[in-house]
Image (tube, coloured by chain):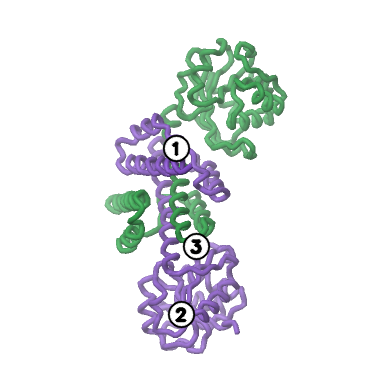
Chain colours: A green, B purple
Amino acid sequence: MEPKRIVVIGAGNVATHLTIALKNAGFSIVQVYSRDIANAEVLAVMAEASAIDNLKQLDVTADMYILSVSDGAIETIALEMPLVKGVVVHTAGSVPMDVLNRFNLYGVLYPFQTFTKDKELDFKKVPVLVEGNISHSKNVIMGVAQHISTRVQKADGEHRKALHVAAVFACNFVNHLYVLADELLEKQGMEFSLLEPLIRETTSKALSIKPLHAQTGPARRNDKQVMRMHQESLNGETFHHDIYALISESIIRTYETQRNSE
Amino acid sequence: MEPKRIVVIGAGNVATHLTIALKNAGFSIVQVYSRDIANAEVLAVMAEASAIDNLKQLDVTADMYILSVSDGAIETIALEMPLVKGVVVHTAGSVPMDVLNRFNLYGVLYPFQTFTKDKELDFKKVPVLVEGNISHSKNVIMGVAQHISTRVQKADGEHRKALHVAAVFACNFVNHLYVLADELLEKQGMEFSLLEPLIRETTSKALSIKPLHAQTGPARRNDKQVMRMHQESLNGETFHHDIYALISESIIRTYETQRNSE
């Protein structure tokens, strides 16, 4: 009863990693579509599929259609597709499932990781979030997802959105703090790599105990003298200074609230 | 000519890891001092040293004295110590070297890592920053440091301070962003561990290429629609909302400046 024949629409980073994982799990990839036939061919060769660049050539008998294209292109492509009977899914975090509601069976298969095309990655460990318009679609998508990942769970649009915002904080913003730290070191002729052991320890600690309990530093101790000294040293640098002040205040409030509720 | 006989003053996390590393590198630890003799004894046993809890008992013939105590206690202990001839160092990032200036030879040996007492750690990889009041002190301290770490470099008080502020951004503040992300997930009944693969990938990318070039996300793309949607979803939560706005603005400015200077 499992869907065996899959059509992949898109040939970018996510499509590539997903297709390889599906192929390795034993699924048959029948077609790879891309506007650019050369891109479609690269992936099609890897997947032993045919490459197409025209949606009219779409095999309408496949069990599943995976739209793994840019957020903005999902709706357009869905409208251009023939009305297939298989389950149609997209792979985007912040696009509602219902842009696919002209099909009978549809949903979302959202792999929650950043993918770099030429960098190998163990898909088994990638969390995959699944949504389906009816329970049959959901079960079919879950079944496929569980063949390629050990971390599959259901998540509706609200959950995916929360996860996306959380990732902005925990990844995009974290990287920017690294940028700010690097700027401070560069000014003194020091290398970012000096921070490496400390960064690795911070990350591993936050992942092994709850980050709330891993917090250290002057703001956690509410050490006003050190914080004042640091902020004075940042006076010429608007964003460093303001970010230092705001996050310190947020840390102080976090543990104040905790103290008051104890 | 190398100092062979070392006295350790303090028995906390840093003192413990440092003493073990020195012992393993072949130095002779002659005494361990702590106000609390029980603490001194635990470390003294490991280091095959004598434990003391009275600074009058200090062996005045040692080659080096390492004050590894809380920032506030360094000056007090330095004043209580006999005027020894060996090199006196402290191990603190944000305390000026000159609190030790009643001695002839003094300086700083600052291991740049967070230490947890019962957690083993490869000291060889810990960056150690060294300062000395005259070149002789500096050379002696460098010599000792190079026996326990492969990452020793000179750094004056200004450099140590910049490094400390950078660590607040790259470690303390990063952990707080994890806390904020965890709060968002918890509200939707989701686990922080969902972010683990993404966090690990972000960290490893920032450490392998410059973080400036690793930046991704809506602010990096200046995607105002997604940023507005995210901020609306954070409206009830002051710090989440304000931190989202400020860091996004800082990211936009960072790459704007870059674009303008190209």
Compared to residue B197, the image places residue A200 above or below, namely: below
- Are both tags, 1 and 3, on one chain? yes
Mark 1 or mark 2: whose residue is earlier in sequence: 2
Nearest the camera: A215 or B97?
Answer: B97
Closer to the chain start, of discs 3 and 2, is 2
What mark, if any, has residue B190 been given in the picture? 1
Spot occupied by residue B236 in the image (x, y as percentages of width and height): 29, 36
Q: Secondary structure at mark 1?
A: loop
Whether tag 3 and tag 2 are in contact, CB under 8 A, the answer is no
Element carrying mark 2: strand
Q: Is residue B101 above or below residue A179?
A: below
Residue type at the position of mark 1:
Met
Badge 3: residue crowd in 10 Å (few <14, some 14–19, many ≥20)? many
Evaluate whether residue A195 shows in this view: yes
Dot in front, 3 or 2: 2
Label 1 – label 2 distance at C-alpha: 53 Å
* Image disc number at residue B106: 2
Residue type, label 2: Tyr
Of residue B174 and residue A154, the one placed in the foreground of this image is: B174
Is A152 situated left or right of B231 in this image? right
Chain letter for the residue marked with disc 3 in the picture: B
- Residue at the (55%, 68%) spot, across then down: B152
Residue A185, placed above or below residue A85: below
Q: Residue at x 45, y 85 (%)?
A: B104
Amino acid under label 3? Gln
Instruction: Give the quarter of the image for residue B39.
Output: bottom left
Q: Position of residue B25 (x, y in %)?
A: 61, 74
Residue linked to disc 3: B113
